[in-house]
Amino acid sequence: MKYKKTLLILLLFLFMYGAGIGAAKIVDVFSSSNFLRNATDNWGLGFGEDGTTPTGNVSAEELQEYDAYYVGDTGKKTIYLTFDCGYENGNTEKILDALKKHNASGTFFVVGNFLETAPDIVKRMTDEGHLVGNHTYHHPDMSKISDLASFQKEMDDVSHLFQEITGKEMPKLYRPPQGKYNVENLKMAQELGYHTFFWSLAYVDWYQDQQPTAEEAFQKLLPRIHPGAIVLLHSTSSTNGQILDELLTKWEGMGYTFGSLEEFL
């Protein structure tokens, strides 16, 4: 794959140079902002030293052009807790209990199935001051949706059902399913008034038959926490339901406080 990409760049260099465009233009074409402009990718992170902000495969500055974020203010020891809710299996209320105990705000990104099967929990989320965001109705690969009408339907079906359940308008917060995105998606979300949220800290917590132990979770989540972290956890994780109270206590002991994604709006 790397060989093919190198060959492609070399051929394009020769073509453009021969056409009189020059090397400076070629560098611009392959800069991250331009090369990724038409690319589809999975959100990914690169980690450095413990406690430092990871790098995303798109910079925070580039994302902000589209009202999109993966990290908050890196100068403040604030953590933003977010939870992806694909379905309900008995762990979300444990998570809500822990958040209530710590007076911490969370954002729950829900899909249609969760709204259909757990409306009382959704009401509890809003009653206790949490945000409920849009994770699309069917959890598709949104990067494969190229027309605005289809993109909007995935979003509207969630927001309309949320309003039927709660009587409230859904906040314009969006998380792409599986972190799959392209710039056209970010533009469409922005055009619909949404702010898109990726994450700067997560761990493998979504396999039901391979749940990490509490110790394994702490080994991932404690050293890598950093100022401004947007943390992604899954509400389906029994480990998260078990450890969240202790995890929040440990983060507080490290000097962190908990913020709300409303701050980004």
Image (cartoon, helix red, strand yellow):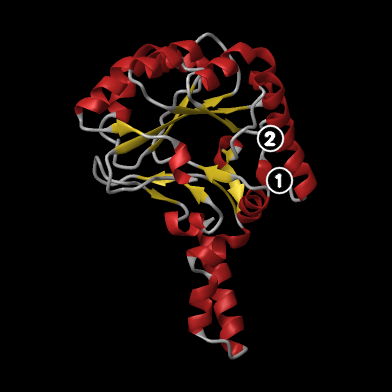
Towards the viewer: 172 or 200 = 172
Q: Is residue 29 above or below residue 259?
A: below
Residue at 74% over, 42% down: 152
Residue at 58% over, 75% down: 11
- Point out which mark residue 144 bears: 1
Towards the viewer: 193 or 207 = 193
Towards the viewer: 80 or 53 = 80
Image coordinates for residue 34, horizontal then vertical, percent:
55, 67
- On the image, numbered disc 2 is attached to which residue? 140
Residue at 49% over, 68% down: 31
Left or right placement of residue 150 versus residue 255 in this view: right
The residue type indicated by label 1 comes to Lys
The residue type indicated by label 2 comes to Pro
Q: Can residue 65 be seen in this view?
A: yes
Image coordinates for residue 217, horizontal then vertical, percent:
34, 22
Badge 1 local density, few (<14 within 10 Å), some, or many (20+)? Answer: few
Kindly indicate whether the residue at mark 2 contacts the one at mark 1 (C-beta within 8 angstroms).
Answer: yes
- Callout 1: helix, strand or loop? helix
- Callout 2: helix, strand or loop? loop
Left or right placement of residue 100 versus residue 74 in this view: right
